[in-house]
Amino acid sequence: MTRAQIAEPELREEDVEAIENGTRDADAAELGILAERLHCSSAELEYGITDRWTAALHARVTRAETALRQSDVQTAGEELARLIAEPALRCLPDLRRRVGYGYALALEAADNRPAAIEQLTILLREACSDRAETAAALAGMEMRLREQRISIALALCRCHREVGALATAVQVGEEALERETPSGWTDRLVELASTLLAAYVERGDRERMAQFATELLEEADLLGSPRAIVAASWNSAVVARILDDPLEADLLTNRALRVQAELGDGLAMGRLRMCMAEYTLRHGPQDVERIERMLTDAHAELVANSAHPGDVISCLLALARVDLLREEPQAALKRALMTVEQAADVVGPVAVEAHELLAEVYRALGRLDEAALAQTAAAQALEKMTALRPASAAWMVVADLHGDAGRLDQGRAALQQALMCAAL
């Protein structure tokens, strides 16, 4: 091909000559044109990364993502860590963000939320930069970059909420909505908004949660997609229960379950059913038979679909709480001990809940020494997660248990630990 054939009609022949001779660099638009003429990728022209090598990287990322979806967290995390170290990723921003996001999800699944938060914060800052926007626009990938930004912000909001940093979770969610809603609502944006709504719920912001739940339902209905309707309906049902509207809560709950069933995703259905049963167990009317049926069905769905161990443990813990409601503490103890054993290698909210429930069961049985030990394990786990406000509350419970058992020195030590966490 002559320089004229390569250049026409978008470029000038002298520009092609200057780029070829190295007297000036091609910009992104020129690289795209030249790559199309020469039947290769822009990455190959600019960095020497061949299409074959890029395809191999994409295949590795896909395998790692599949392993993560199948709850093989260790395999996924190790491969994604190796991919992050690949020098070629510095030249492939879209794939680099995909790898970084997957690695953050693997860290979260391994209950290393502080590391996940650090990774997601860096990713979100880069994805919101002018450089990323310009590169995406030139590559015709603006919508893909937007969905990546939303997914990163959603995961970051969720991680902050799960370690008890509710103010930061709200800030991340609100900033993301302010940035993304002018471009229109999507399924993923509704899911981000639902995560933000959960943070309002946990913060106890009744006025804001009521208003936001109404807005979220309206946007999901306008969008009309099953994913959006399930996300908005579930969290809005939680709000309705808090606001003492059981009829509305039941309508929204049943709607979410019905739409989720139509999607045919057994794992998601099991998680949704478990979450709804757990919330009803904690805050709703105590229809023990119905709750137990929901949890039993959810456990079967989670096991059948190879759910993450944390989900299965959460379901078993809820069933142990049902045993307590039935005033069957020995059955609850057996189930609680089993879940603590299963959660031995887990660091995160589910491990904390397992120890706290075990402490509750021991207390019901009058075994205060063992209750204090179990509650201490929960408080220490919260400290490791840097969830200091919940850790302070957990140490207060330890102090109460020691006080009830007449161990005043240990009670004072637990109170001092609670004060230290509160001060931090």
Image (spheres, helix red, strand yellow):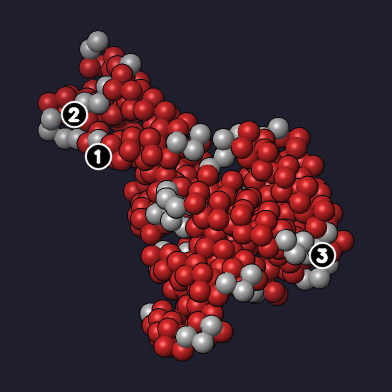
Nearer the N terminus, badge 3 or badge 2?
Answer: 2
Distance between mark 3 and mark 2 Cα atoms: 73 Å
The answer to whether 263 is drawn above or below residue 370 in the figure is above
Alpha-carbon neighbours of circle 3 within 10 Å: few (<14), some, or many (≥20)? few
How far across and down, in percent of the image, does residue 380 sit?
41, 68
Q: Is residue 355 left or right of residue 4?
A: right
Q: Which mark is residue 285?
A: 3
At x 40% / y 81%, what residue is drawn? Answer: 417
The type of residue carrying mark 1 is Ala
Relative depth, front residue between 139 and 128:
128
Residue 202 visible in the shown view: no
Q: Which mark is residue 85?
A: 1
Is residue 343 visible in this depiction of the protein? yes
Expressed as whole percent of the image width and height from the top left, the position of residue 279 reads 70, 60
The three-letter code of the residue at mark 2 reads: Ile
Secondary structure at badge 2 equals helix
